[in-house]
Image (cartoon, rainbow, N blue to C red):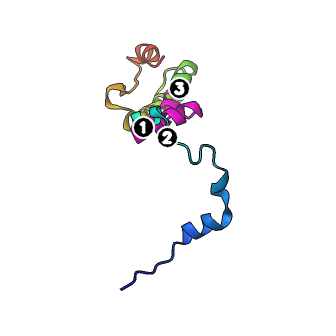
Amino acid sequence: MENNYNDLIGDIIKSSKSMDDIKGKGKPLSKEYLRKDTFQHFQKIAKEAGYLPEWLNLQKEIHHELTLIQPGKQNMDKINNKIRKYNKLCPAPLQKPLVNEDNFKDECHRWK
């Protein structure tokens, strides 16, 4: 019994001929590439492209807002919502406490 199937994506790639002009085609992979796992390789490429994880962008945003605002309940609620989101996204050792009027100055220094 013969297994016939349609390879739609493969057919599209073959017909487009876009795979013929890929840099490094037919050459062995570098030793550096083979030393790293897929995630490490992705991190290197992302870093070179200027990508930052969402939690780092949020960290910068929170620091910026803490330097601009004055202590107050409404301002604290807005910042604390962002801190909650940050704490969900960042690695556990980097999580930070919520801001209140008592610890506002200390937290401003901690977010630098």
Residue 29 drawn above or below residue 58: below
The residue pinned by badge 3 equals 60
Q: Where is mark 1, residue-wise?
A: 34
First along the sequence among labels 1 and 2: 2
**Mark number for residue 7?**
none
- Looking at the image, can residue 76 be seen? yes
Q: Nearer the viewer, residue 34 or 55?
A: 34
Residue 32, percent across and down? 46, 31
Q: Residue furthest bottom?
A: 1
Point out residue 61 in the picture as x, y percentages from the top left corner.
Answer: 54, 28
Residue at x-position 42% and y-position 41%: 38
Mark-to-mark CA distance, 2 and 3:
37 Å
Tell me which corner region of the image, top left, top right, bottom left or bottom right, holds residue 68.
Answer: top right
Tell me the number on the disc at residue 29.
2
Question: From the viewer's perspective, is residue 18 above or below residue 57?
Answer: below
Residue range corresponding to the magenta coloring: 37-59
In the shown orientation, is residue 91 left or right of residue 19?
A: left
Element class at badge 2: loop
Q: CA distance from mark 1 to mark 2?
A: 7 Å
* For marks 1 and 3 on the same chain, the one whose residue lies earlier in the sequence: 1
* Marks 1 & 2, CB-CB < 8 Å contact: yes
Separation (CA) of disc 1 from disc 3: 34 Å
Q: Is residue 49 magenta?
A: yes
Q: Amino acid at mark 3?
A: Lys
